[in-house]
Image (cartoon, coloured by chain):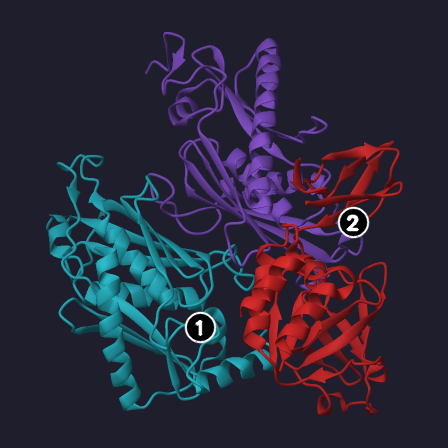
Chain colours: A purple, B cyan, C red
Amino acid sequence: MELIKDGKRIDGRSFDELRPIKIEAGVLKRADGSAYVEWGGNKVLAAVYGPREAQPRHIQNPTKAIVSCRYNMAAFSVSDRKRQGPDRRSVEISKIVSEALDRVIFTEQFPRATIDVYMEVLQADAGTRCTCLTAASVALADAGIPMRDFVSACAVGKVDGQIVLDLGKEEDNLGEADLPIAIMPRTGEILLLQMDGHLTMEEFNKAVTLGMNACMKIYEMQKEALMKKYTGD
Amino acid sequence: MLSEIKRDYICQLAAKGKRVDGRKFDEPREIKIEKGVAKNAEGSALVKLGDTSVMVGVKMAPGEPYPDTQDSGVLTTSAELTPLASPTFESGPPSPEAIEIARVVDRGIRESKTVDFKKLCITKNEKVWVLFLDIHVLDYDGNLFDASSIGALSALTDTVVPAKRFEIGEDFKLEVEHYPVSCTSVKIGSAILLDPSLDEETVADARLTVSIDENGDIRAMQKGLNGSFTLDEVKSIINSSKIKGDRIRELIK
Amino acid sequence: MIIMNSKNKKREIVLPGEFLGENLEPGPGVYNEGKQAYASVLGVKSVRANRVNVVPLSGRYIPKVHDCIIGTIIEVGPSSWLVDINSPYPALLHITESPWRVDFGDAAKFLNIGDAVLVKVSGVDEIKRVQVTMKDIGLRKITGGQLMEIPPSRIPRVIGKGGSMISLIKRSTKCRMFVGQNGRIWLDGGNVSTAVAAIKKIEKEAHTFGLTDAIGKYLEGK
């Protein structure tokens, strides 16, 4: 399958173009904070509960809050039905997302507590972990959790020898490299970085720059979504 | 944890014929149904019942028939009370509540012959369609039974059997033959309230879910909680379930 | 950053990580990096003299000493009660901090699970263990009336500047009210449903200007 034709990608995008993205803050009633993100064919809901007292008590940390994330895919979110419950992939994603968010939250303000972040993938395309992180960070701000900064995420990859932004489904399956990245937009510090495939040093440099620039665009959309909720426009 | 004051307040209002949100006893909350919300599913629906929100997806794949029904497709229903829906839901294996909801929805569909499973036989004794109905609870503000069963029926009406993907002919629309609609009522003191909110559900003594089809016949029932009903109360609940169910059916179709 | 103008008043909503200014003393909701001050929560920026703080627009109730709040008893021990105060941390109410003479083991005779109490935060230690007391004027067990919950971040607006909003509602509805800093409000007598509606209106329109006037008009119309 040809993934690039006449300088355009298989879905018609240019190399540095994001898929359409829609972010909405505060969509759930029961959660302390929440967000809904549509990103290309991804549909993700994130909810934050807490800070709340960590249970059972023996897991409590007397100096800071525990940030506990759960990434979960709905059974009908993928083409081949996903069985209920965590598989090894979701456990790994939950772990790295928890670690990324832990860095931005002022956890020391809430000893003995947990901040629970639940992410549900309702419809999966490529790039669910970046979509989830983006949603989670909006949900955390919506929940009033004190943070150093936002977390904005995006994937970059290599397709038919070209470095391209925000891989789509076919590109993800057939491409040569995939590199999800999450940053703190204010400082540019990297919070999440993974890669699989094959990149030269030069390609990596190009990809990271492209990805980080895209994260800044995502950041603008995250801010816009929160402003929309809190100023009522 | 509901404070005694809140509990007393709901009960006192109910004794005066009122509800906290100003609804009449037999008045359901606003119902919104959106179909085709999950494109990787064969059929799907998002149902909002007031602030309760449930997403239901249908997935289908060829599989083996049950030994006692060699010529029929197979229905498998599960419910997931995701922890994002309520501070009291936890991740982990399905809770008894989730299993009860899945079984009540499953019975409503199976026993009312909503779908003719004989039409989902591919090769007798060998291969049939397995229909997975997955209920995903997103926001819990009471009455998951009705939100889930309305969602299930709506998702089924949205379903296209993916025959082409499995190389067994052309895709075809799943035929929904009956439209059983479930309505849940709770008893608070001697008052009967349709479509309970979370607080009303918490205070309630007893709960009754009645599923009624388009002909006005009863297709499934489930009584819950540790209170009881008189026979007259049951009959009156069945009656109002029929009237309200007729309106909800129009929304689903 | 969005600046909302209404005549000469300004409310600036900021997001976590947003730059607030230089050489400012950081108050609540603010953190410093070198000389730069940044917001740590989503809220309204407020600068007074050389001090900057961000008043949160959401978030759970974090107990502070002297706060008056409404709690619900969740556990009864021999010499104390555990009180849910709508915060990440439950509070301890010791029998000696109650208005009654309670003998060891008799706590349940005075307060039981589900009872609502007006209490005051008397202590919060470094690991956020919270103690409350009922030994002050007006603190007691509450019975009857109605209890509502709104986001704790909206409470300052329900109270209003110098208590202006709350007295307006009380005057107009003849309701007895107790507004807990933890987002719980108890109402009794008078026109409770109008008072509840007015509070819900404040909750919804908390970010707007001239709210006291708007609520005044709303109450007049009732």
Percent across and percent down for residue C165 are 70, 64
Residue nearest the observer in this picture, A18 or C183:
C183
**Which structural element holds mark 2?**
helix
**Which structural element holds mark 1?**
loop
Crowdedness of circle 1 by 10 Å Cα count: few (<14), some, many (20+)?
A: few
Quarter assignment of residue B213: bottom left
Q: Is residue B220 visible?
A: no
Using residue C142 as the reference point, say whether residue B214 is left or right of it.
left
User: Which corner quadrant holds the C terminus of chain B?
Assistant: bottom left
| Above or below: residue B54 compared with residue B225 | above
**Which numbered marker is on residue B172?**
none
Q: Residue furthest top?
A: A6
Disc 1 residue type (three-letter): Gly
Residue that numbered label 2 is attached to:
A108
Disc 2 residue type (three-letter): Glu
Residue that numbered label 1 is attached to:
B22
Gap between marks 2 and 1, in whole Å? Answer: 44 Å
Residue nearest the observer in this picture, C138 or A98:
C138
